[in-house]
Image (tube, helix red, strand yellow):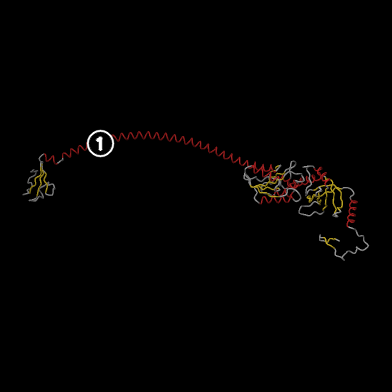
Amino acid sequence: MNGDDGDGTTGVAALGDAPAALDGDGTTYDVAELVGVLGELVEDAFPDDIWIRGQIRNLNRRSRKGHVYFDLVTPAPAEKHPEAVLPVVLFDWYRKIVNRILGSGAAGQMVDGVEVRIHGRVSIYKARGQLQLQMKTIDPAYTLSRLADERDRLLTELKAAGLLERNRALPLPTLPLRVGLVTSAGSAAEADFRKVLSASGIGWEILVVDTPVQGFGSEQRIAGALALAEQHGAEVIALVRGGGARTELAPFDSAAVAHAVVARSVPVLTGIGHEIDKTVVDVVAHTACNTPTACATALVDHAGRFDRASLDLWRGIERSVTARLAGDRHLLDAAARQTCAAVMASCRGARSEVRRLALAIDRAAHHGTRRASQRLDSLEAQARAYDPQRALERGWSITTDGAGQLLRSVAGIMPGATLRTRMRDGTVTSTAGAVRPAETTGSDHD
């Protein structure tokens, strides 16, 4: 028989170690008999259906017949084991009733991690010998009330700590091209988000951080994904998912995800597909949008404002430069006209001066020519006056020595020297005889 070893494990008692209370006179039950007795005891203890509350776990088992199986546990954080677990079966015909109560797209749905209040019969499942609850209906108001109370409590705590506006106070980058997308990879939410960014024609860089966006334990996964997106250099983070019931959106009302958003040093935008109340994450985020498409559109519009501002700036620069060039062209034209007028005036003055100088030069040339001509005439007259030939014509003669040197005096002429005397009509060569200097004052002419 099985027993507890005291350390949480189950052992098997060895033969011969049976307790003394077990003797040959005790009743021995068949397994089916014992289970049947336990079933009767349970039915006697709970003859009627009961209401029971707890947290849904392991809501992922469904038979081919449409029956749903899950565990109802004492509420506990994801990282801890629950204190108590009760298996629950929801037969297909009751499942249809529950679905009608919840309604398609209603505010409350059965999902992992949500606290519920359900109604059913406690029994023993003989095939496994385990206690179980055969669920028949659900109280959606209980779940919604619990979610609303937790939401209000968390918002009050965040407000008291001054955390509601922390992420919203962060400046949104002028052109945040590196976008961290936190969502379930391959989901319609991711596809819708990507479609809008791709159609914008802007060079976005999308960093997808895959995470479950509903179900038990998703709060911690989403919080970790937000931190991972920032660690990988996202300039802005988009947290998106498709539409869902309030219970499916419960992770976005959790303290773990809210504090993860508050702790980010980059803006967080939400695009959670809800149509009624905002989640806590929407309240603490930088910008809250209704859908993934709207979230992507908000980023595109923000980038578009930068593009339009840049275009307006360049147009302003163009207008300023055009106006400046037009003004400079006007000044340049005016300066050119002034320069042209000044040059023309200067040229006219220079032309007049050139004519004046030309006339002056002409007059000076004529005057100089006349003076030169007169001088030449005077020199010519002097030359004619001093021309030896004229003196010879008048009867004078010129005597030179044998070397052709002109003799002006008898001094130095030696007797026997050769003399050449030039006259009007020829030259006479002679030999000096006696040389006699002049004896009296005056000039003697031979």
Q: Position of residue 407 (x, y in %)?
A: 12, 47
Tally of numbered tags: 1
Instruction: Identify the residue shown where x is 25% and y is 36%.
Output: 369
Q: Secondary structure at mark 1?
A: helix
Q: Position of residue 155 (x, y in %)?
A: 74, 46
Quick check: 98 left or right of 410? right
Residue furthest to the left: 434
Quick check: 306 left or right of 143? left
The one nearer the camera, 61 or 214, is: 61
Residue furthest to the front: 64
- Name the quadrant of the N terminus: bottom right
Residue furthest to the bottom: 16
The one nearer the camera, 204 or 233, is: 204
Residue type for callout 1: Thr
Residue 270, by quadrant, is top right
Quick check: 66 left or right of 29? left
- Name the quadrant of the C terminus: top left
Q: Position of residue 411 (x, y in %)?
A: 10, 49
Residue furthest to the right: 25
Q: Position of residue 51 (x, y in %)?
A: 85, 47
The residue under label 1 is 369
Q: Residues within 10 Å of mark 1 (few under 14, many from 20)?
A: few
